[in-house]
Amino acid sequence: MPEPSAPRIRAASPADDAALGLVDRLTWSPLHAVMPEPQPPYDSFFDERHPPGDFLVAELDGRVVGYVRLVPPTPLAANAHVRQIQGLAVLDEARGHGVGRALVRAAVEETRRQGARRVTLRVLGHNTPARRLYEAEGFTVEGVLPEEFLLDGAYVDDVFMGRPV
């Protein structure tokens, strides 16, 4: 089987609803999820709080394989200079092809394009692969809420990371 091409990152559109919903369900894991595993009947991926304009989509060979959600962390003017990654997902079959890295880089570039100065995120303390990726892309730990979540019977830290753009 030939190697897939480099990931293509683009803005999401309403037509991506079903594909992104599938990515979201297939990538659910207690490694990064604080919400229960989705069960049918499934809601729409996009809704009033999660419009297409908040998402960048990753494609490999024309197929949707991941996304990142990038939003202002609050509606306050006092931190309008910050964007926050509030969701990053890559299908297992697309891992190892630079998709996650391309999405993080695109989020940083989109933050810059929007005129913001910083990008932040929250990651579960036990999610070592994601933390390594973020650190490799210039994010540093800026705070930790110890044992913030109880997941699968274990307490897990909530790690805040950020970087300038």
Image (tube, rainbow, N blue to C red):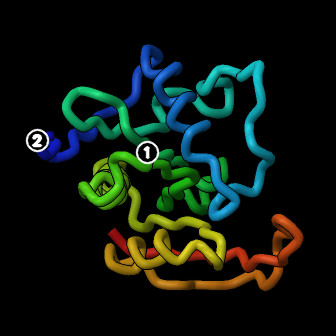
Would you say 104 lies left or right of 17 here? left
Would you say 83 lies left or right of 13 here? right
Q: Quadrant of residue 91?
A: top left
Would you place residue 39 above or below residue 3 in this image?
A: above
Label 1 neighbour load within 10 Å: few <14, some 14-19, many 20+ = some
Marks counted in the figure total 2
Q: Quadrant of residue 115?
A: bottom left
What is the number of the mark on residue 101?
A: none
Q: Secondary structure at mark 2?
A: loop
| Residue displayed at 43% across by 14% down | 15
| Residue displayed at 65% across by 24% down | 47
Mark positioned earlier in the residue sequence (2 or 1): 2
Kindly tell me whether residue 115 is visible in this rendering. no
Residue type, mark 1 in image = Leu
Q: Residue 129 at x, y = what percent?
A: 47, 72
Q: 144 and 81: which one is in front?
A: 144
Q: Secondary structure at mark 1?
A: loop
Q: Residue 73 at x, y = what percent?
A: 61, 55
Q: 6 and 134: which one is in front?
A: 6
Q: Residue 139 at x, y = what percent?
A: 42, 77
Label 2 neighbour load within 10 Å: few <14, some 14-19, many 20+ = few
Quarter of the image that includes the C terminus: bottom left
| Residue displayed at 61% across by 33% down | 50
Residue type, mark 2 in image = Pro
Quarter of the image that includes the N terminus: top left
Residue extending furthest toward the top = 15
Kindly tell me whether residue 141 is visible in this rendering. yes
Alpha carbon of mark 2 to alpha carbon of mark 1: how far? 18 Å
Would you say 102 lies left or right of 144 here? left
Q: Which residue is mark 2?
A: 2
| Residue displayed at 70% across by 59% down | 30
What is the number of the mark on residue 91?
A: 1
